[in-house]
C-alpha cells in the first residue's frame, strides 16, 4: 500500500470563486492545489463582456500571485454579438457559459428561449470561431427531472452545430451518460458531490441544507452510474467541482451550492483508492480536461498527498461569515503535503 501519491497539474473545470472579500477568502483552496480552473461568470454583475472577464482575471491572478490560471468564461446573453466574441477570442477566452433564465444562482440574466433564432445565431458564431459552449442544462420542471427534460435541447444543439463542443455541466442524471455517447461533440463535467452523494444524503434523515445544490442530488442509481464513469476516467468527462461557497446563514436560508474546494484532492484520492481505481485519478482530474478543452498554458504543479489523516474543519471563517465545507468534521485518510 503506497504511503504517498503525486498528481500532476490538477484542473477544476467548473469553479465558483465569487468576488471581493469572498474571492480573497476562498481562492487559496483552489489556487494552492490546482493548476487552473474554469471560473464561472455568474457574479452579482455577470461577466458578459471581455472587458469584465479580463478585469476579473486580473483580480484572481493578483490574489493567487500567478500560481493559478483562471480560465475565463463569458456569460451568454441574447445581446452577445460577433464583435464581442471576436474580442474574447483575441483575449484567449474560448468558453461561453449558458444559464437558462432562473435555473440557478445568478441566472436572472440567462437565456429564456434556448433555441430561438437569436441564440442559435450565437451558437453558429461560436462554432465558427472555435468556442466551447458550457451549459447549465436544466428545465423549469420537476426538480428531479430537470436535467433529463433538458437533454433534447442538448441533442438539438449537438445535431445543428456538429463542430461546436458542448459541455453538460455538473452532470447529475445517469441518462445524460447515454447522450454523450451518442454525439461526438457532447461532453460533460462531474462533481465530487454528484458522484458520492444522493438525495438520501440531503433529506433521507434530518435535512442537511449544506448538501442542497443545483442540479439536485439524484437517486442512488444516478450517483452510482456517474461514479462508475468517473472511476474509469471516461474520456468525454472531466472533473469540475462546482464548489460554490455561501455563508452559513445564506445556506440556512436556502441558498443552493456545496463548498467542496477544501477537501477535493484528498477526497478524490480516497474515493478512487477505495474502489481500486487510483490508476485513473490522474486522467480524471487533469488529462481528460487537457484533451477536451485543448489546454496547454497553465502553471505546472506536482501535488503530493501523504497517507496522513486530514481532519476537515467544522467551518472556515471569512469576513462575511462562516463557510461550512463538504464533509465538515469528518476525517480523510489523505492529506496534501506541505
Image (cartoon, rainbow, N blue to C red):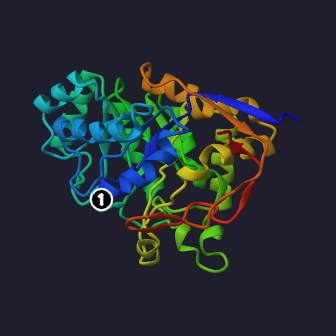
What is the x, y in percent for residue 239? 55, 39
For residue 336, side relative to residue 89 (left or right): right
**Residue 90 lies in quadrant:** top left
What is the x, y in percent for residue 312? 65, 59
Q: Is residue 169 above or below residue 245?
A: above
Q: Is residue 223 above or below residue 329?
A: above
Q: Which residue lies most toward the right here? A: 1
Would you name the residue on which mark 1 appears? 106
Q: Is residue 85 above or below residue 216?
A: above
Q: Nearer the viewer, residue 163 or 129?
A: 129
What is the x, y in percent for residue 315? 56, 66
For residue 167, side relative to residue 273 (left or right): left
For residue 102, side relative to residue 284 (left or right): left
The C terminus, quarter of image: top right
Q: For the point 56% across and 29% down, which residue is it?
A: 286
Q: For the point 44% across and 59% down, which residue is it?
A: 245
The N terminus, quarter of image: top right
> SS class of the residue under badge 1?
loop
Q: For the point 37% across and 52% down, which residue is it?
A: 23
Amino acid at each position: 500500500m503506497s504511503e504517498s501519491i503525486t498528481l500532476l497539474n490538477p484542473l477544476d473545470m467548473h469553479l465558483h470563486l465569487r468576488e471581493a472579500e469572498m474571492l480573497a477568502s476562498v481562492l487559496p483552496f483552489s489556487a494552492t492545489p490546482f493548476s487552473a480552473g474554469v471560473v464561472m461568470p455568474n457574479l452579482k454583475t455577470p461577466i458578459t463582456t471581455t472587458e469584465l472577464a479580463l478585469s476579473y482575471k486580473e483580480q484572481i491572478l493578483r490574489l493567487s500571485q500567478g500560481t493559478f490560471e483562471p480560465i475565463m468564461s463569458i456569460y451568454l446573453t441574447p445581446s452577445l454579438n460577433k464583435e464581442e466574441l471576436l474580442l474574447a477570442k483575441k483575449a484567449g477566452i474560448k468558453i461561453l457559459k449558458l444559464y437558462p433564465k432562473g435555473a440557478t444562482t445568478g441566472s436572472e440574466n440567462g437565456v429564456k428561449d434556448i433555441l430561438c433564432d437569436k441564440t442559435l445565431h450565437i451558437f453558429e458564431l461560436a462554432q465558427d470561431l472555435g468556442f466551447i459552449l458550457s451549459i447549465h442544462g436544466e428545465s423549469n420542471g420537476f426538480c428531479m427531472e430537470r436535467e433529463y427534460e433538458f437533454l433534447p435541447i442538448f441533442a438539438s444543439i449537438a445535431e445543428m452545430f456538429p463542430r461546436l463542443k458542448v459541455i453538460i455541466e455538473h452532470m447529475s442524471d445517469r441518462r445524460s451518460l447515454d447522450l454523450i455517447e451518442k454525439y461526438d461533440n457532447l461532453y460533460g463535467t462531474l462533481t465530487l458531490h454528484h458522484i458520492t452523494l444522493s438525495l438520501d444524503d440531503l433529506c433521507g434523515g434530518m435535512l442537511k441544507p449544506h448538501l442542497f445544490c443545483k442540479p439536485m442530488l439524484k437517486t442512488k442509481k444516478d450517483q452510482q452510474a456517474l461514479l462508475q464513469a468517473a472511476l474509469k476516467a471516461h474520456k468525454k468527462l472531466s472533473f469540475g467541482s462546482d464548489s460554490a461557497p455561501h455563508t452559513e446563514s445564506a445556506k440556512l436560508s436556502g441558498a443552493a451550492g456545496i463548498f467542496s474546494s477544501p477537501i477535493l484532492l484528498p477526497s478524490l484520492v480516497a474515493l478512487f483508492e477505495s474502489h481500486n481505481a487510483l490508476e485513473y485519478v490522474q486522467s480524471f482530474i487533469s488529462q481528460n480536461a487537457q484533451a477536451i478543452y485543448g489546454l496547454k498554458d497553465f502553471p505546472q504543479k506536482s501535488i503530493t498527498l501523504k497517507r496522513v489523516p486530514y481532519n476537515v474543519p467544522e467551518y472556515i471563517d471569512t469576513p462575511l461569515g462562516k463557510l461550512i465545507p463538504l464533509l465538515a468534521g469528518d476525517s480523510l485518510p489523505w492529506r496534501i503535503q506541505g
